[in-house]
Structures are given as structure tokens and as C-alpha cells.
Amino acid sequence: MMIALKAATPQLPRTTAVADHVVAVDETDSTNALAAQMIGDGSLTLPDHQDGELAVAVVAADRQIAGRGRNGHKWISQPGRCSTMSYAVRIPRAIATDESVNGWLQMIAGLVTLDALNGMIEEYGAAPNQPDCLLELKWPNDVFCHGLKLGGLLSELVIPPSSGTDADADDDVVIVFGVGLNLALGACWLPTPQSTSLQLHVTGLPSFGEMRDAVAERQVEGFRERLAKFIADPKGQTESLREEMKAVCWARGRQVEAHFTDGTTLTGEAIGLNEDASLILRTQDGTDHTVRTADVGVL
């Protein structure tokens, strides 16, 4: 019999030391929704750094009771086992709304997450159970390990109170990146047969609380560094990001099926990413299709 776990307010000393603002609660509907609410009512503000360094705020909860994923999917988590965090970053409106580059914001969030997980594993001297136990990204928003979902990401645009619909294109908006990670979830707690947890693949990990804090600290620093570079030269960063994604894109080179919101599907080989971060899917007749919004699964 599984015992219900009690939520507790996350303790995040390392994250607090590097973030501009940290909000930690034991339970909330969704950390993304809480972040958006607080940004909207002015209780969570992000300073405008004059030296070019980006401000990053963190909203953390031990339990989400209405966690959300892309396309209305639910994110199920367990307190004391799953990290549920949202990272809020101010970026120029012109970049956030430019469809030729804004798809890379989600890819950057994925790369930041992989960097943070791998960095934490290295710091504590932990090691994969198998040599091919690599952390990868399933386009556009999942963290995968051995073909199973270890985490999910959801990015959402929030308009701060000082901006409005008539604001200038060079005004800042806030992007909230929600990151849910199964760090210490036992096999009996996995929500679906397609999901997994870091502790099932890596030995020598620290306690859940230490893992959560160490990963979040690295994510704050990663978002700050990577997004600053992207904002400075979004077009110039595209090619280097595409090269990075080649090494960690789980779908690349596989036969996949894209499920669209209108109920249609498209089957083919995922061969790479376009300049706008959309997926290139090559069907059996040799035609390349652009996939911008879909759930993608391997056949």
C-alpha cells in the first residue's frame, strides 16, 4: 500500500543565493500559475539590471495539485520526490513575440535543464547505472532518459503590470519557464509506464532536498547566462543552438508520429530542426514537413 506523502515548504539556500527572488510554498495549483498571478498583481517583480545581467525569479512548491503541461496535459508529481519549479525571466517583447526566433526559448530551457541535471550528478560524484544512460530532450518540451519521460517543461508569456497591449515593441515581458522533474520517485510511484525518475538510472545521488536545490541553483545561472547571450544576438545564436540540439535531440533520426491539436497525425523521420526551432519531419515519399506544435511520439 502506498502512503500519501505530506508536502513541506522547499528549502533552497543555494538557489536563494543566486536568484533575484525566491518564493517557496508547500502546495499550490501550479507554480507557473502562481508566478503569473504574482507578476500580474505586482507582488513578484524582476529588477531591470543596468549591467546587462538578467534578473531571474524562482517560484517553487513541494506539491502541485493542478500541474500543467503543453496542450492541456496534466503534470502529476509527488511531494518530496518531484521538483516543481518555475523560473521567471524578463526579456524584450520583440524577441518573445518574434516567431522566427522565439521557438528557441523552449529549446534553451531544455538545454539549461540538461546542464543543471548533469552538473548536479557530476558535483556529487554520482554515476549512471548503464554507460548509455544519457539525458536527452524530446522535442519540444520533455526530458528523456532511455526513451522514458523524466521531466517536462512549459513556457508561458506574462505581461507585467507596467506593460499593456499598446506597449512599445522594445518593452520587456516576462517568460515563465515551468520545469517538473522526477528526481527521487520510486518505480511504484511512476504515473505512467512511459515515465521514469533520475534515481532509477543514477547511483550515488544526494538526498532529494539537496538535489532539488543544486539543480535549481544551476538552472537560475543557466537561464541567466544562456538567455543573455540569446537576447544579445538571437539570429547569431541559432546555428550554435541547432548544433547543440543535434547531440541531445532524442527524436532525431527516429521514426515518429506527430499528433496535432486538430486530431490529425503525420508520420515520418525526424531529421532535425529548422532555423526557427520547428521540427523537420520527412515522410516516406521524401517530402520534408515543418512541425511547430504537436505531441511527438516514436513508433
Image (cartoon, helix red, strand yellow):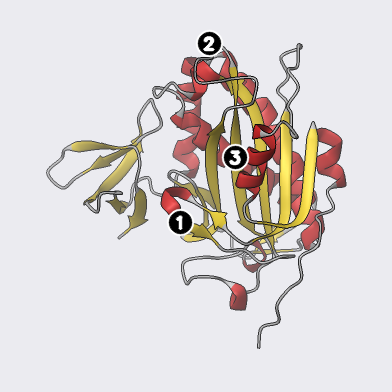
- Contact between labelled residues 3 and 1, with CB atoms less than 8 Å apart: no
Quadrant in the rendering for residue 89 = top right
| Residue type highlighted by circle 3 | Phe
- Report helix, strand or loop for mark 2: loop
Q: Which residue is mark 2?
A: 168
Characterize the local packing of mark 2: few (<14), some (14-19) or many (20 or more) Cα atoms within 10 angstroms.
few
Q: How many marks?
A: 3
Residue 36 falls left or right of residue 220: left
Name the residue nearer the viewer: 174 or 53.
174
Residue 39 falls left or right of residue 107: right
Q: CA distance from mark 1 to mark 3?
A: 16 Å
- Contact between labelled residues 3 and 2, with CB atoms less than 8 Å apart: no
Counting from the top left corner in percent of width and height, residue 288 is at: 21, 36
Quadrant into which the C terminus falls:
bottom left
Does residue 237 appear in this view?
no
Q: Which residue is mark 3?
A: 177
- Report helix, strand or loop for mark 3: strand
Quadrant into which the N terminus falls:
bottom right
Q: Nearer the viewer, mark 1 or mark 2?
A: 2
Name the residue nearer the viewer: 204 or 156.
156
Counting from the top left corner in percent of width and height, residue 7 is at: 76, 65
Residue 231 falls left or right of residue 208: left
Quadrant in the rendering for residue 64 = bottom right
Q: Which residue is mark 1?
A: 73
Q: Residue at x 45, y 56 (%)?
A: 73
